[in-house]
Image (cartoon, rainbow, N blue to C red):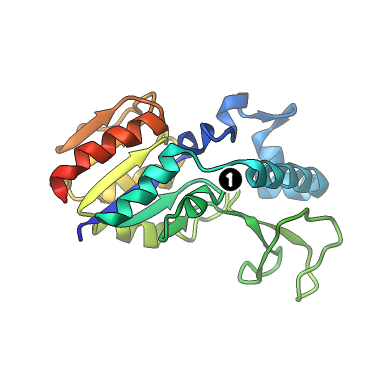
């Protein structure tokens, strides 16, 4: 089976009703994104950050995978599919994708503020005073702005070894994720699915599908038949 590597962004989950920071002009209830998604914000007002992610967790729990998630999962019948997602939701997994790498963490996981290796599952809320086994406060296991992205190296390796590379629902403005395209071999077929095709340096073997993710993934499925 050919290795199909798919990088997904917020546009995939938007049609499941999950808003992005950009949908709200980078604000959340009047707060700058850095107030709720950065180490600075955490040190300034940890309660506000926990409230933000507790609400996101409820939103994700209530959301359902859409046709784009399901269409990408269905491609596992024909390809060795690896999803690299910038999203913190679990909609790819719930749609049936079996190999999902979360670049920016997962909303249903929490970790010690002192040890990022101490990770636990969480379905409800995280509160101030909730402690990890090392006695440190628990925080969302999310990669915040200004933090390192530990999963970028395995993601880059996947991109380098892709037989086919696909971008779905990503604006290609958040780094280092946006740089993954640069790791893909020039000869590798590339497909970009988005309702607003992001600006990319001209590369060989690139096909644009300018549609929302649910419609675009359906078109992608047809286009990929030639590689089966």
Q: How many labels does the image show?
A: 1
In the shown orientation, is residue 20 left or right of residue 159? right
List x then y, in percent, for residue 129: 86, 61
Direction from residue 160 to residue 47 in the image, left or right:
right
- Quadrant hosting residue 19: top right
Q: Is mark 1 on a helix, strand or loop?
A: loop
Would you name the residue on which mark 1 appears?
145
Which of these two is toward me, 70 or 196?
Answer: 70
**Disc 1 packing (10 Å; few <14; some 14–19; many ≥20):** some
Q: Which residue is drawn at 23% across and 41% down?
A: 190
Residue in view at x 48 percent, y 38 percent: 66
In the depicted view, which residue is nearer to us: 100 or 79?
A: 79
Picture layout, residue 133 above or below residue 80: below
Q: Is residue 191 left or right of residue 119?
A: left
Q: Which residue lies furthest to the bottom in this view?
A: 134
Residue nearest the viewer, comparing 13 with 113? 13
Q: Residue 31 placed where, x, y %?
A: 73, 31
Q: Which residue is the extreme one toward the right?
A: 129
Q: Is residue 180 visible?
A: yes
Image quarter of residue 60: top right
Q: Which image quarter: residue 136?
A: bottom right
Locate the N terminus by quadrant: bottom left
């Amino acid at each position: 089976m050919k290795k199909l590597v798919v990088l997904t962004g917020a546009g995939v989950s938007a049609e499941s009703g999950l808003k992005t920071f950009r949908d709200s002009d980078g604000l959340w209830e009047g707060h700058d994104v850095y107030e709720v998604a950065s180490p600075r914000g955490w040190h300034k007002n940890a309660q506000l950050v926990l409230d933000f992610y507790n609400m996101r967790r409820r939103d994700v729990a209530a959301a359902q995978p859409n046709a784009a998630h399901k269409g990408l999962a269905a491609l596992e019948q024909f390809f060795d599919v690896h999803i690299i997602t910038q999203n913190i939701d679990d909609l790819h997994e719930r749609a049936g994708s079996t190999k999902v790498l979360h670049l920016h963490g997962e909303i249903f996981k929490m970790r010690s503020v002192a040890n990022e290796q101490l990770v636990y599952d969480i379905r409800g809320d995280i509160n101030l005073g909730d402690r990890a086994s090392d006695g440190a406060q628990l925080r969302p296991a999310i990669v915040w702005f200004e933090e390192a992205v530990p999963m970028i190296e395995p993601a880059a390796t996947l991109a380098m070894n892709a037989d086919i590379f696909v971008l779905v629902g990503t604006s290609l403005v958040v780094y280092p994720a946006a740089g993954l395209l640069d790791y893909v071999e020039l000869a590798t077929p590339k497909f970009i699915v988005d309702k607003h095709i992001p600006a990319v340096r001209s590369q060989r073997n690139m096909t644009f599908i300018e549609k929302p993710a649910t419609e675009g993934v359906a078109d992608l499925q047809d286009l990929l038949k030639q590689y089966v």
